[in-house]
Amino acid sequence: MNNQPIGIFDSGIGGLSILGEIKSILPNENLIYIGDTAYLPYGTKSKKIITERAHKICNYLIGQQCKSIVVACNTATSAAIHELRINFSVPIIGIEPAIKPATQSTKSRIIGILATQATLEGDKLSTLKQKFGQDITILHESCLGLVEEIELSNQQSQTLKNLVEIYVRPLIEQGADTLVLGCSHYPLIRTLIQKCAGDDVIILDPSLSVAQELKRQLDTKKLLRESNSGTTNCSQTGDSKTFEIFIEKSKLKYGSSLLTI
């Protein structure tokens, strides 16, 4: 049995979609979640800045004795996962767009990817497209401004609804019958995306797969915690009131703002 916590980070509230899946299948684990809101959003930042932030946050989490770290952000995974795995000895779990499942589920042979510009330009996505998308038409939308609007945590916002329409509708009109959520923020508005796309469109969210891979690696390395229910502590590097409110609404423990990392 290993009582050390698991570290999870994203630029804001997006990674909470992954945290939820981790809590569901690993209820005994102690979790530390960091929202890097001082640098939100990652999707418009350079690879250099994202990699620097990822290293600093991982250093902090290692200092908190974390036995594994989940990079709960597609953009940070694409930019920094290779370097993180070289520099840190604990298991580092990343997230990537569900291209392979999409190519297996599509009937029209056309899939659409919703992601940030940084993810779309990253090597990780390019590799996945080359590996699994040879006989598939892969469309994509760089969803500028969508993460920032999701961070406002108001799903009734007309601006949010308009952005979803702007990015989803063109993919459906071009024949996509499967959409890949290529940013961990997007599952938080899955209902809006599904409504815009239509009930017949398959929407793929890799959050559960990330949690399952984490469990597999911890089990393999004999690092699972077998005691009673674990704890979850959430903090942020900025001072986002939205982040704090969202954590409280999710009934999670809020740690602190302006965490120095």
Image: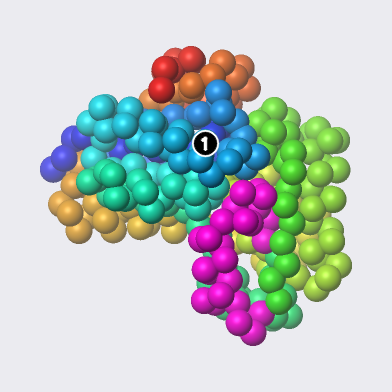
**Residue 38: percent from the left, percent from the top?**
55, 23
Label 1 neighbour load within 10 Å: few <14, some 14-19, many 20+? some
What's drawn in magenta, residue-wise?
113-136
Residue found at the far front of this picture: 48
Q: Nearer the viewer, residue 205 or 69?
A: 69
Classify 16 as above or below 60: below
**Residue 54: percent from the left, percent from the top?**
43, 37
Residue under circle 1?
A: 49
State yes or no: residue 126 in magenta.
yes
Classify 194 as above or below 22: below
The residue located at (86%, 67%) in the rendering is 173
**Residue 112: percent from the left, percent from the top?**
70, 65
Q: Quadrant of residue 189?
A: top right
Q: Nearer the viewer, residue 169 or 43?
A: 43
Query: Left or right: 119 with respect to 237?
Result: right
The residue located at (38%, 36%) in the rendering is 55
